[in-house]
Image (cartoon, grey):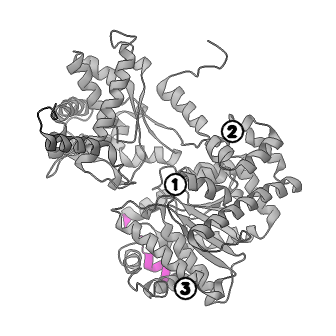
Amino acid sequence: MLFSKGDYLQAVEQKVASEMISKVLYPSDSVERGRELRLIQEYFLVACALEDIFKTYLSTHDDFDAFPSKVAIQLNDTHPTLAVAELMRRLMDDHDLSWTQAWEITQATLAYTNHTLLPEALEKWSLPLFEHVLPRHLSLIYDINHRFLQTVTTTWPGDLERMRRLSIIEEGEPKHVRMAHLAIVGSHSVNGVSRLHSELVKTSLVPDFYALWPERFNNKTNGITQRRWLLQANPALAGLITETLGEAWITHLEALRELESQAQDAAFQQAFMEVKQTNKARLAQRIEQTTGVRASPDSLFDIQVKRIHEYKRQSLNLLHIIHTYLRLIEDRTPPPVPRTFIFAGKAAPEYWAAKQLIHMIHSVAEVINNDVRAADWMKVVFIPDYRVSLAEIIIPAADLSEQISTAGKEASGTGNMKFALNGALTIGTYDGANIEICEEVGEDNIFIFGLRAETIETMRRQGTYHPQAYCKREPELARVMAALRSARFCPKTPDLFSWFYNALMEHGDYYFHLADLASYIPAQLHAAEVYTQPALWAQKAILNVARGGKFSSDRTVREYACDIWKIQPVLKGRQ
Ligand SMILES: *Cc1c(COP(=O)(O)O)cnc(C)c1O
């Protein structure tokens, strides 16, 4: 149309603007980046999904009575929460349903999965921006909030403070729309993604909503697919398992439990560890190609691969690396076994601290990898461009899986499950799904360390955490801190570690590095000692595979289908 009027420039501008909507994938991870384009993208995806759903539904129905029994919409985090308002808009404005009819259908159709407790990751849109992009949706949200606050008043008459806490609209200059609140109000189910996380959603994230609607809250512990993370990524181990047990595990992961009887069998242990050795040799090759570092497949492969984030504590891993190096050089005490410390992971482009962490890992790696005194004992590598295809090569080669988030911060983790299923032992905090992995594999077959979520919460609330006190008590921690303060691990960029040293020693160490380093060091030493006993290590690694059945996404999907969507599986061979 614009072309025919000859307004070429305007046509190009409109084309560029519309293509922007689907061009840039927002890379932020656990840090919310509120930008107009992002809101437009979220609306675009929600509107298209609902258009598709309506088209399909209305091809076989002429009213909406059966809509909630034929359609289930799972809000995967708050990103598609505009669906609450969009579904209301379509039912009322396009199909003339009353508010009551539309609201009943909306609530019965939608369910919400929460993925994070981090306050900085909770989606909020400023009212002026929201009104500019989606004025009709904002007016519907005001109506939803008005009716919701009436129920709150009925339950807690005169409790204005509670109204303020529960409202979908956050007071302030400017006001904001709280997308998690909209998702909870508009859904019939709210779930977290591990047992601990689902408890924290109820007791710490939204306790007022839990008090109002306890029956709405439930847990669905995450899972991973064994077809990708074992059958495809680790064909040698998949082959060994199938040779031993048959193929049942491919569709029924619980069948792996039969491997328990092989855990102490010397021949099976040998075959199992040969597979691991082959996978390690393949990864060592890839590491040399991409980084030039020569890693010995005979060393312990200690691996932390995941998005770079302060709460995931690649920094704690780095403190242990520095400790190991200082112990070797200053105390002339080598570790029980040579280790290759392997990192990979991406940082969101605007996340300054995450980018600094990558720089710090490279800087420590350069010092250690170029010190001949450390050559037989340690190597540190950062593999660039972490992604699923690279994870499929890295994870099958792991001896030790680093899952060391500050307790209470990692909603579930799924990397932890991929590693265990590939026969790595976990060193980890009592956080997210690590707790359930520990429960399944048994505490003798995992290295758990660190403060519990409840303890950390209490210490935060009471202000009783004093990182310097840990340094005074433990000379080994003081030595690591002194090294951070010097330019020893960053001769080319002397101030590289200052911000991190200050965060730990001057600004309260929000992520509890010093408290947990005190138990992380002995846990790492214990892991290394077990690794020097090959039969014992093999037994524990085999038990991690054998007892990983719970963590299949088949189980997770079945639970969503049964408890939330109320749908039955279509049985093969039956009509
Ligand atoms: C599994 C996976 C993740 C998630 O890892 P966590 O350790 O659970 O944070 C991230 N990135 C890639 C490429 C993955 O395969």
Q: Point out the stretch of residues depicted in magenta.
A: 462-473
Q: Is residue 574 above or below residue 296?
A: above
- Compared across the picture, whether 5 is left or right of 506 comes to left
- Compared across the picture, whether 405 is left or right of 510 comes to right
* Mark 3 to mark 1 CA distance (whole Å): 39 Å
Q: Nearer the viewer, residue 39 or 193?
A: 39
Q: Position of residue 270 (x, y in %)?
A: 84, 58
Nearer-N-terminus badge (3/1) = 1
Q: Position of residue 562 (x, y in %)?
A: 54, 26
Task: Give the residue type at disc 3.
Answer: Pro
Instruction: Tell me if mark 2 has few (under 14), some (14-19) or many (20+) residues whose alpha carbon lies within 10 angstroms of its own.
Output: many
* Residue 466 within the magenta-colored segment of the rendering: yes
**In this rendering, which labeled residue sits more in front, label 1 or label 2?**
1
Furthest residue toward top: 62
Q: Position of residue 564 (x, y in %)?
A: 47, 28
Q: Considering the numbered disc 2 on the image, is that residue within a helix, a strand or a loop?
A: helix
Residue drawn at (25%, 50%) of the image: 35
Q: From the image, tell me which residue sits under label 1.
A: 387
- Compared across the picture, whether 174 is left or right of 485 comes to left
Q: From the image, tell me which residue sits under label 2.
A: 253
Q: Is residue 256 above or below residue 571?
A: below
Q: Is residue 210 above or below residue 527?
A: above
Residue 461 in view (yes/no): yes
* Residue 511 within the magenta-colored segment of the rendering: no
